Image (cartoon, rainbow, N blue to C red):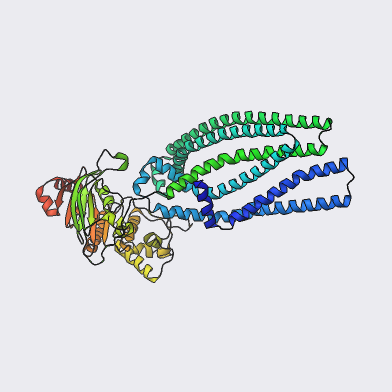
Amino acid sequence: MREYKFIFKNIWKASPAYIGVNVLNVVLQYISFAVSLLFYKVIVDLFIYGQPEMEKVIVGLVVFYALKIVCESYNNWTVNIYNSLQQIKIREYVSSLIYHKCKHIDIECYEGAEFYDEYARAIEDGPGRLQDTANLVSSFLSALLKIGTVIGLFFSLGYIFIIVAVIYCVQSWLTLKLTNRLFYRGYLLDTPINRRADYINGIFRGYQYVKELKLYRAYDFFARRFADIKDQLKLLKKKRVADLLKILFTSNLAGSCLKAFVNIYVIYKIVQGEYTVGDFTLVFASVIALSESVSGIINTLPNLKNNKKIIGSLIRLLNQEGRSYGNATLPEKEQLEIDIEDVSFAYPNEKERNVLSHISLQIHEGEKIAIVGENGSGKSTFLKLLLGLYEPTEGKMAIGGKEYCEYDREEWQKLFGVVFQDYLIYQVSIAQNILFKENLDEEDEKLVWEALEFSGLDSRVRSLDKGINSVLLREFSEEGVFLSGGEYQRLAIARAYARKARWIVFDEPTSALDPIAADDVMGKLYRLGEQKTVICVSHRLTTTSSSDRILVFDKGRIVECGNHRELMDRQGLYYQMFMKQARYSQ
């Protein structure tokens, strides 16, 4: 019942009148059904066994069809117009709940296949399932009312009809149980396969993949992958269809035999004079109504059960607990230091292997720190811990004398402006890519231009017809603008600058820039560091020489620490890396 309580509670919040409108529709449809069922028996018996007054018959027909027209018109308006309009409101409301929750889900949750599959089902299917389930509940209640009415009529005609109805319902229930199990098992098997198909669709659709697809002639490779995935789906569905046909054939055969028995029995009773012709009409219509209602339940309950499981995934997503944080705030004017004491870390899906081991470090506000090391040495992971995206497996990290878990999550993270190595560019305007604001005032525009000037992208943006309002790429605009890889990286740097954070963190900030541009950007970053803390991961050791300190990572440990001259004099790992790069440069 938890799922249904969630459904109707949130539908009520999104569209308060929705439930009342649909309940009234169920009531009117039932009244129309009950009147129709009895009306034809009365008319038939009246003409065969009585002497009806035509005026009363005509009045009865007018009232009957007027009622039918009102009920059907209300049903058509509810189903085809009202519910369709409310669907937008309900989906929007539930989607907003999901999007709000996603920002509080810890990043490690996404690394578990079980969570990610459930997360994909919830975010893709969840918003539409609320209204779908509410409609199914309406259909289910309507069918139950009809079945109850039919059984009541059968009871008045004889116990044999009750036995037949019970057998028919039991047979239908078994069919329902088997089909429900079949469909849900298929849904679970299809989910990861559909996710892979969506990924390949994204490759063919995404602009960022076009160059490599063409250069490496990878179209055929991924097309074959896509075909293999579709073949897997076909095999699963083929087997499912075969199993379904067996179930339905057995069910339909049993149902047909029961219907035939009822009709033969009623005809026999009419010949014996125990039933009227109107009773035959009533029984015939009731058998059809019973069959349709039970079939409706058979079609409804599997979907209800599957929807219930999807809604369960949605509820678990919305109830997903993140790490607990305190509510402390960072002092605005005090100099801050980050104290890292004996920190080790292993990713949740590889707990047996430490990516970082026994890191101890103190970072002072205003420092310019470079982090270097070979690929896989733990540099990017260290940044993720610093940003509060993960918690240390061992040890602690503190700022201003308090561990970061004592601070409000957003309070800690607003301390940092970040450019990740795998930064993303969004298909919105340049200004919105920097500030993530829908409407910009004069101060916002001034900040955007300041950030673009800092990153060196301002002249390129000024050359565009719409300037900072130019939309990037063409998913949402036919006039979308394409930039170079280095320009996109400058845009990401502008985004970090515009955050006006006290600490700036860069993970390979110049990887897409030429050497001259890289020197220019690094010079700006370090000038920025005169007033802010700059932490920069870089493979280009020529860009690290101006740093106050250089941290050399190797196999998850800090093996050297000092400025450029000190590390060169030691002739350790940093010296070897620097000299090797210098030879390659020459």
Q: Residue at x 57, y 56 (%)?
A: 86
Visible residue check, residue 365: yes
Residue at the location (40% across, 43% down)? 115
Give the vertical position of 71 relative to 453 (above or below): above
Q: Position of residue 491 (x, y in %)?
A: 34, 58
Residue furthest to the bottom: 442
| Viewer can see residue 586 | no
Report x, y in % for residue 60. Answer: 82, 51
Residue 531 position by quadrant: bottom left
Corner quadrant of residue 332: bottom left
Q: How many marks?
A: 0
14 vs 266: above or below? below
The answer to which of 579 and 135 lies nearer the viewer is: 135
Q: Position of residue 219 (x, y in %)?
A: 44, 40
Asked whether, in this view, residue 387 is left or right of residue 150, the answer is: left
- Residue lying farthest left? 569
Residue in view at x 21 percent, y 49 percent: 372
Q: Position of residue 57 (x, y in %)?
A: 85, 49
Quadrant assignment, res 411: bottom left
Residue 35 lies left or right of residue 408; in this view the side is: right
* Camera-side residue of 143 and 194: 143
